[in-house]
Image (cartoon, rainbow, N blue to C red):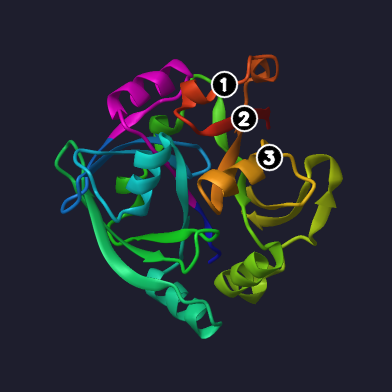
Amino acid sequence: MALTLDHIVIAVKDLEQTITDYRALGFNVLQGGEHPGRPTYNALVVLADGAYFELIAWRSPSPGDRWWELLNQLGDGIVDFALLPPGTAATVSNAQARGLAYSGPHDGGRLRPDGERLQWQTARPPSADLPFLCGDLTPRALRVPEGDARVHPNGVRGVLSLSIAVEDLDASLARYRALLGETQAAHIGTPLVLPGAGARVATIALGTTTLVLTQPTQSAAPHAAGAQQLATRGPGPFSVVLGTSSPAAQTAPAWGLDQTHGAAIELAVA
């Protein structure tokens, strides 16, 4: 079983306001619940392709937590993303055997508002250009609801692409090959230079989602998305393209970062 996109983490200071704003954009937003042993709670935007946005907030300061530090210093925005492994321990072991030092598995969980307790295991990467892993111990459908929960008035159905800023594209690709293994690594595209964008990029196909690794070139303008991400938040995810079944999305005004709480989100008909 291949690794696929599990979720994208958006850290916010005011969860209730974020829920209101995402519903105004046409998303069906679900209350997620509390994380026992942590001061965090969340809400979910679950998509038809099985991936989701995790909107996460803190009830108290959490110094040393990278997500909280980014939120505290830079405000709302995308802070991380996770892949779904066929088995967390086995994926970690395989990555370590290929020289990639993931840590874990680490036990985690969430208490849903209806009292259901969820359990999972995570594994943390050695660098921020890589995803963390999130594998379920309880059924995934409890963590990631199915059916009508995945239907959105704006027609959004899934994540077409996720752009990730990297400092050294070749080094990042080597790390991704070690994470994915030989079979999935065959879906890594040849790096290309995009002069107009001031970037060197490579794509990685993960099921219906494409990861776009982006290394700004020396000619990149300071405000270019990948360059800006590296200068402010460091390596990591910075932009999402969502597929929608609504043709109106093609002519609708682009969403501002104030509407999406710092997450750069585009829509494309697919």
Q: Which residue is identified by label 3?
A: 222
Q: Which residue is identified by label 1?
A: 255
- Estimate the x, y position of residue 169 in percent, counting from the top left: 69, 62
Q: Which type of secondary structure does the marked residue at label 3 adopt?
A: loop
Q: Determine the residue positioned at 55% across, 29% down.
A: 156
Instruction: Give the amino acid at mark 1.
Output: Trp
- Lower sequence index among marks 3 and 1: 3
Q: Specify the segment rendered in magenta.
A: 6-31
Figure check: 163 above or below 93: above
Q: Tags 3 and 1 in contact by the CB under 8 Å rule?
A: no
Q: Which type of secondary structure does the marked residue at label 1 adopt?
A: loop
Give the crowd class for mark 3: few <14, some 14-19, many >=20 residues within 10 Å: some
Q: Which residue is identified by label 2?
A: 266
- Estimate the x, y position of residue 56 in percent, counting from the top left: 33, 39
- Estimate the x, y position of residue 84 in percent, counting from the top left: 46, 58
Figure check: 265 above or below 248: below
Relative to residue 218, is residue 53 drawn left or right? left
Quarter-of-image position of residue 162: top right
Q: Tags 1 and 2 in contact by the CB under 8 Å rule?
A: yes
Q: Does residue 136 show up magenta in the picture?
A: no
Give the distance between the C-alpha atoms of the residues marked 2 and 3, in whole angstroms: 21 Å
Q: Does residue 14 show up magenta in the picture?
A: yes
Give the distance between the C-alpha atoms of the residues marked 3 and 1, in whole angstroms: 22 Å
Residue 145 seen in render: no
- Estimate the x, y position of residue 149 in percent, counting from the top left: 39, 31
